[in-house]
Image (spheres, rainbow, N blue to C red):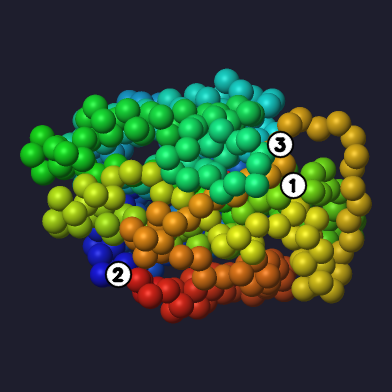
Amino acid sequence: MDFDIYKGKKVFLTGHTGFKGSWLALWLTNLGAEVCGYSLAPDTEPALFNILGLDKKVKKHILGDVRDFENLKKSVGSFKPDIIFHLAAQPLVRVSYKTPLETYQTNVMGVVNVLEAARMSGGVEAIVNVTTDKCYHNKEENYAYKETDPMGGYDPYSNSKACSELVTSSFRSSFFNPAHIGVKHNTALASARAGNVIGGGDYSLDRLIPDFIKAIYSGEKIVLRNPDAVRPWQFVLEPLSGYLLLGVKLLSKDRNSAAKYASAYNFGPYESSVITVENVVKEAIKILKKGSYSIDKGEHPHEAGLLQLCIEKADKELNWEPIYTVTKAIDETMKWYKAYNDGEDMLKFSNKQINEYAEQISFGTGS
Ligand SMILES: NC(=O)c1ccc[n+]([C@@H]2O[C@H](COP(=O)([O-])OP(=O)(O)OC[C@H]3O[C@@H](n4cnc5c(N)ncnc54)[C@H](O)[C@@H]3O)[C@@H](O)[C@H]2O)c1
């Protein structure tokens, strides 16, 4: 059982112009999948999607809004995907404090629209809704959240992703019930909750690594707002390998087997990679041998201080496990930005990172 199943599969990928979506689009096209991307246009300069020339690699590149149900329904209906990976979102905590309405509309009605479009299209075998570790009711205790723990979310982003999980759960009970797979419908629906992702090509606002890279290359200090915040850091390909593996299980020809995986999964790092913001920056400075930081002690909107994920379920049921340590993740990330700034061929470089990572996983292959 491996990722070869994606060869020739029709994959509808929302959020393909973003950071994680671009990496996933590249990996899927390397695997031989026919990818139809559906997203807003890239909104950073530079943008990984453009750097990798992904508009020419995907089968279909649709610039569309997940809030626009009619367009989404038409796009899913005409492409007739085997599987949908839903990544499109407003993914930033601080932005969500400024634009809560848009955040909820995109993250909650967005998933309702995707699931309803899939329901109306009829032939979709598998759906993976990508949410986040922040969906849990976070008590800020030394505890790693399990899939069965209650949803919550203090800020609008985290809460909207908890809502996205609840929507997924309702659609699974009401329309894509695992007990009726292969009888009343044929769709296995799961969700995936990952931690803080780092990797090359992220140019988002208000994220640690992009802020650090901007500071380094403009000769400034990075200013840390929450130096003591503890997060489960992981290399971008780690959760993506989890999403792909979950997709493999949901696409299983044996629909009774696929039904067993129609649930929520955490894809986080090992405990040793759960470190503070300040320690990530110190490690990056050590690797690059340049850079410095200062700490902003001013007032900031609430952000979680401590967050850990239990990954026993993904390990036991999917045989998924993290491969890279946090040091390796930071090292690979810094190498990517250095290569980009040195003018290297980034499609080649990014493919090399995917292949090196894929060679180390026991359940899949790269390009
Ligand atoms: N980056 C992380 O650390 C992290 C951690 C956990 C979960 N996630 C989740 O992973 C997913 C991808 O995150 P990312 O880091 O790549 O974010 P990103 O901001 O780089 O990409 C977001 C994507 O969503 C699209 N999008 C936003 N609003 C849209 C709309 N209204 N209609 C259509 N498309 C829209 C954008 O065009 C882009 O393609 C999100 O669902 C996010 O919540 C990210």
> Is residue 20 visible in the rendered structure shown here?
no
Residue type of the residue flagged with mark 1: Ala
Q: Which mark is residue 229?
A: 1
Q: Residue furthest front?
A: 142
Of 278 and 111, nearer the camera is: 278
- Check contact, mark 1 vs mark 3: CB within 8 A: yes
Mark 3–mark 2 distance (CA, rounded to whole Å) = 38 Å
Compared to residue 12, the image places residue 209 above or below, namely below
Residue 335 screen position, x and y as percent: 68, 72
Pick whichever of labels 1 and 3 is earlier in the sequence.
1
Residue tagged by mark 2? 2
Question: Mark 2 or mark 1, which is nearer to you?
Answer: 1
Compared to residue 225, the image places residue 70 above or below, namely above
Question: Mark 3 or mark 2, which is nearer to you?
Answer: 3
Q: Residue furthest top?
A: 101
Mark 1–mark 3 distance (CA, rounded to whole Å) = 8 Å
Which secondary structure, mark 3? loop
